[in-house]
């Protein structure tokens, strides 16, 4: 039987090109998204809150049921307060571009910035 590595050099190149294409497509989609920017907040994989960042200018704070506090201002959103021991979410700072996200793993809370018009939270599937 001829021995074969699980991935050949050619396969690697093809895979690389595919990954580039996928990344390019995602980037294009993010850039070409219609005006509008929303922060989608999920807890345990379920969307619990959506913040219209396009409209967020003055600081507004949102407290989730799990005690995590988010602040949206100047079209950005950030974790302002969390009782998690690591505090990584707060350190992540403000999210300001479509595609950016921050997570508080101990509180199973994820904030992702998406483009486009506000939509019903149930459209977003994880
Ligand atoms: Zn955290």
Image (spheres, rainbow, N blue to C red):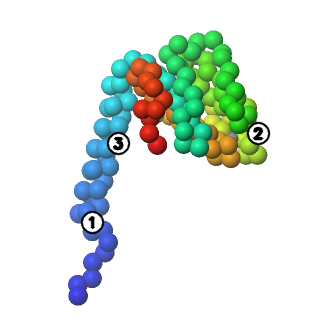
* Local SS, label 1: helix
Can residue 103 be seen here? The reply is no
Q: Position of residue 10 (x, y in %)?
A: 23, 63
For label 1, the crowd category at 10 Å Cα-Cα, with few meaning under 14, some 14 to 19 and many 20 or more, is few
**Image mark count:** 3
Q: Position of residue 87 (x, y in %)?
A: 72, 41
Q: CA distance from mark 1 to mark 2?
A: 48 Å
- Residue 26 sits in which quadrant? top left
Judge depth for marks 3 and 2 and give the one in front.
2
Relative side of 55 to 36, left or right: right
Q: Could you tell me which secondary element the residue under label 3 belongs to?
A: helix
Q: Give the image quarter of residue 56.
A: top right
Please name the residue that numbered disc 1 is placed on.
9
Q: Is the distance from the Cβ of mark 2 to the nearest ligand 1 atom less than 8 Å?
A: no
Ligand 1 image position (quadrant): top right
| Mark carried by residue 23 | 3
Q: Position of residue 120 (x, y in %)?
A: 45, 26
Name the N-terminal-most of marks 1 and 2: 1
Q: Marks 1 and 3, Cα distance to the nearest angstrom?
A: 21 Å
Q: CA distance from mark 3 to mark 2?
A: 35 Å
- Answer above or below: position of 47 versus 86: above
Residue at the spot of label 2: 83
Percent position of residue 105, x then y: 64, 46
């Amino acid at each position: 039987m001829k021995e074969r590595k699980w991935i050949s050099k050619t396969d690697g190149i093809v895979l690389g090109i595919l990954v580039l294409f996928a990344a390019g497509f995602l980037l294009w989609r993010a850039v070409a998204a219609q005006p509008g920017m929303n922060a989608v907040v999920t807890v345990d994989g379920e969307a619990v809150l959506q913040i219209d960042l396009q409209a967020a200018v003055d600081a507004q704070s949102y407290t989730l049921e799990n005690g995590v506090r988010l602040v949206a201002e100047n079209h950005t959103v950030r974790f302002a307060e969390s009782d998690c021991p690591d505090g990584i979410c707060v350190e992540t700072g403000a999210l300001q571009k479509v595609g950016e996200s921050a997570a508080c793993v101990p509180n199973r809370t994820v904030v992702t910035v998406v483009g486009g018009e506000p939509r019903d939270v149930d459209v977003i599937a994880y």
